[in-house]
Image (cartoon, helix red, strand yellow):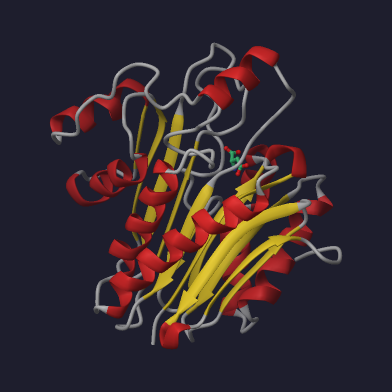
Amino acid sequence: MFSLIVHGGAGPHRDQEDGAGAQEGCLAAARAGAEVLAKGGSALDAVELAARLLEDDPRFNAGTGAVLNVDGEVELDASVMDGETLRAGAVAVVKTVKNPVSLARLVMERTPHVMLVGEGADAFARSQGIPAIAPGALITPLQRARWLEAQGAKHGTIGAVALDARGQVAAATSTGGTSGKLKGRVGDSPLIGAGTVADSRWGGVSSTGLGEFIIRVGLARTVLEGMRRGLTPDAAAAEGIAELVRIGGDGGAIAVRTSGEVGWAFSSERMAGAWARDGGREGTFFERTGSVR
Ligand code: ASP
């Protein structure tokens, strides 16, 4: 048995007019991650691969295609957690790395730390042989145009959560954050318990939405707690989102339970995503029907 679910960020419709394209990108990433799991690969490898594909897809606000900060620069945040050992790695305000999720995994595996930020994170990437990308290489014409037009707050994120055939769970989240953000702003995505959490006893979660609210309700941990109490991933995600809405936030969460089910909930107009399970079962989601989900 294995399961994997990914999201391409929650938000209003104006942030993502191409709903079909977003679902297509999510499904491709979910299928690639599921292929790793079908071959007996680890949940950690599966979420890293799925997240890298979404980072490389310019339709999503992570890696290539990330939104720009107030100075027109890309500053990336990402995290990963291994539910087997509860080890975690994260990076924030990274400017010269194409795939921050992989750098987060290196922080987890090759340092005694959980998070590196800014210049230190970029320097660590160099020490690990990750080449510096050319300045501006991750900036797409669309994001440059949006920045020039200063079109309100844009955001979005990508995330992946998987359960492997050994019963282990992993989760990963990666983002460009919110457009026009102050230099040095860090959202929920690199924070364990807010943007990402995994514990193989119960499941794993990845969040999306305005980080300033998600951090305050510890959204990923709240959803995990629901699954620990026996809720399905859908019900646990809906409970977490209700907490977010209660304080004026808006967003979504995806979850996998150790028993194999996948689930999601969102209060925003849309959240692109896809899931894949053993037996060729798969699906996509985008628009919300009802108040949550
Ligand atoms: N959570 C991300 C952040 O606040 C943005 C998003 O998911 O839309 O950085």
In the rendered image, the vertical position of residue 141 relative to residue 173, given as above or below: above
- Whole-percent x and y of residue 56? 39, 42
Q: Foreground residue, 112 or 257?
A: 257
The reply to whether residue 199 is in sight is no
In the rendered image, the vertical position of residue 8 relative to residue 129, given as above or below: below
- Whole-percent x and y of residue 80? 38, 53
In the orientation shown, which residue stands out farthest toward the right?
Answer: 290
Q: Quadrant of the N terminus?
A: bottom left
Tell me the quarter of the picture where residue 240 sits: bottom right
Q: Foreground residue, 146 or 232?
A: 146
- Whole-percent x and y of residue 5? 50, 67
The reply to whether residue 247 is in sight is yes
Q: Quadrant of ligand 1?
A: top right
- Whole-percent x and y of residue 171? 43, 61
Q: Foreground residue, 72 or 83?
A: 72
> What number of labels is visible?
0
Residue at image coords 42%, 70%: 162
Residue at image coords 50%, 63%: 27
Residue at image coords 52%, 17%: 183
Q: Quadrant of the C terminus?
A: bottom right
Residue at image coords 24%, 78%: 39
Tell me the quarter of the picture where residue 14 sits: top right
